[in-house]
Amino acid sequence: MGVLRRYLYPWSKTGVKVFDSDVLVLGSGIAGLYTAIKASEQFKVTVLTKKTIEESNTEHAQGGIAVAIDEADSPTLHLNDTLKAGAGLCDPLTVRILVEEGLICVEELMGMGAQFDYHDGELALTREGAHSQRRILHALGDATGWEIERALVAKVKSCQNVSTFEERFVIDLLENDRGHIVGALVLNGETGELESHLANAVVLATGGLGQVYSFTTNPSVATGDGMAVAMRAGADLMDMEFVQFHPTALLIPNAPRFLISEAVRGEGAHLINASGIRFMENIIGKELAARDVVARAIWEEMNHGSVYLDFRPIGEKRILERFPTIYQTCLKYGMDVLTMPLPVAPAAHYMMGGIATNSYGESSLPHLYAAGECACNGVHGANRLASNSLLDGLVFGARIVEKIGDKGPGKPPSWEDVLSPEGSLNGTGIYRSQKAIDGQSLRTHIQDLMWDKVGILRNETGLREAVGLLLGWEREVLSAGSVHELETVNMLTVGVAIAKAALDRKESRGGHFRSDYPVRLDESWQKHSLQHKEDNDVRYVPVSRAD
């Protein structure tokens, strides 16, 4: 078994700059910013972000946000679709909260300035995979995430009670002698100095971990940092085996795996093989089956040749109207979707698991909350329903603020009460690596291994090999200094968690498919978490969800 370090490297309290607020939000996607805005109505809030405030998975979201706003739709229908997509592992209570409270949150989002597309005076709605109704709100055709991020950033900048710090990398969470999380140890990426940001409530909204895989639709910042720091602090993680692979990402040499929104298929595009045949015709739901079904079908078809997404059935006018970003991006790489099918392949897209929370975003550690993709509250189960992720960030970000408000501001944490590990920074407050790792080489090895052995199709032999190699690499890493190296260590941490969880689940369910156990066992809620024990072992334990 591997050694899970409490801190990434030795540090002391000498020379660390100290900041404080009531609520500390780590991350600047939809979950982080919406939480910060809501919390600023009662509290002094600090937002930390690894790069710029605009850079997150939210900004790259194309399809839209799912909400039962149409007269022909209902929260009950949305709930049923979500439960079905989740393959028996969704928490029905949490899903009901999502679909019912989501309506209010979306209205608030629009009140904050987000402008969605309209058609004939009504909000324009589209349909995506596994949805029974057209309920996907979108903006600027296929730039929904960009528009939401724009509106939230503008709103945050207008909030007097919110302070934002860019280029801040969260190294580890801080705790006091009572085991309460009281802040975060942060590396200032511009100066190299260590900072301590203290708060009565800490909210992890750090997004996903797609960069753990060779091929991903996620931006470079998605390295699983929030899940890794929570795990080192002793928080429960759960459902880490459930990684969603988006069926359609651009597959062109020397081009990134640019996401081709599910809404393209929702508007009528066809998946075809190298012979021009629609290979999804005999599958229930066809191109709009659940994401895991479509991704595996494409993966298997690729054994016989290339797979293409044919936009042409949508019609030229509708393509240009609904998918201007996709059209222009593909054109940049020499692909005109108006006249030719687009080569596509699956890519790592979303983590259904994460930091275990209840329906108010509370983790297993006092004063630590989590929302958005880094959290696991039972909404997504084994396979997220398309366009539920943005709604998830809104609803449970709001509920976190509600819970913090109910508890009251509390006594501000003191720097004197913060526990520090043994070790020093040579008295400077600036970390200098004792033995730098080859960050890029190790990162590439992690990504290739995860893609090959812990990807779309898995088996015991490959998973055991992955766990062994990842643990071996983890033991070899003595220290890390740069943000890139620290990210790579976090990727190792979450990579081990994913591989171990996948090895432990001996069935196929949702995004987790075992070729040696291809059958789903039953519909029971088979939840597990990862927990950090005192002996530095990592084990699986059942999780209680009582709020």
Image: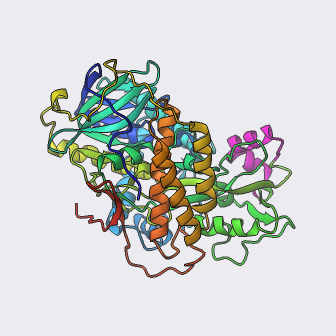
Compare residues 320 and 165 and report the one nearer the observer.
Answer: 165
**Residue 301 % position (x, y):** 75, 69
Residue 438 within the magenta-colored segment of the rendering: no
- Please indicate whether residue 286 sits to the left or right of residue 470 in the image: right
**Residue 184 % position (x, y):** 31, 34
Compare residues 516 and 339 and report the one nearer the observer.
Answer: 516
User: For residue 324, which quarter of the picture?
Assistant: top right
Compare residues 412 and 505 and report the one nearer the observer.
Answer: 505
Residue at 29% x, 19% y is 15
**Residue 471 % position (x, y):** 48, 54
Q: Quadrant of the C terminus?
A: bottom left
Residue 187 in the image: above or below residue 456 = above
Residue at 57% x, 61% y is 454
Is residue 424 visible to us here? yes
**Residue 383 % position (x, y):** 50, 65
Read off the magenta span: 314-336
* Magenta residues, dominant SS class: helix
Is residue 55 visible to us here? no
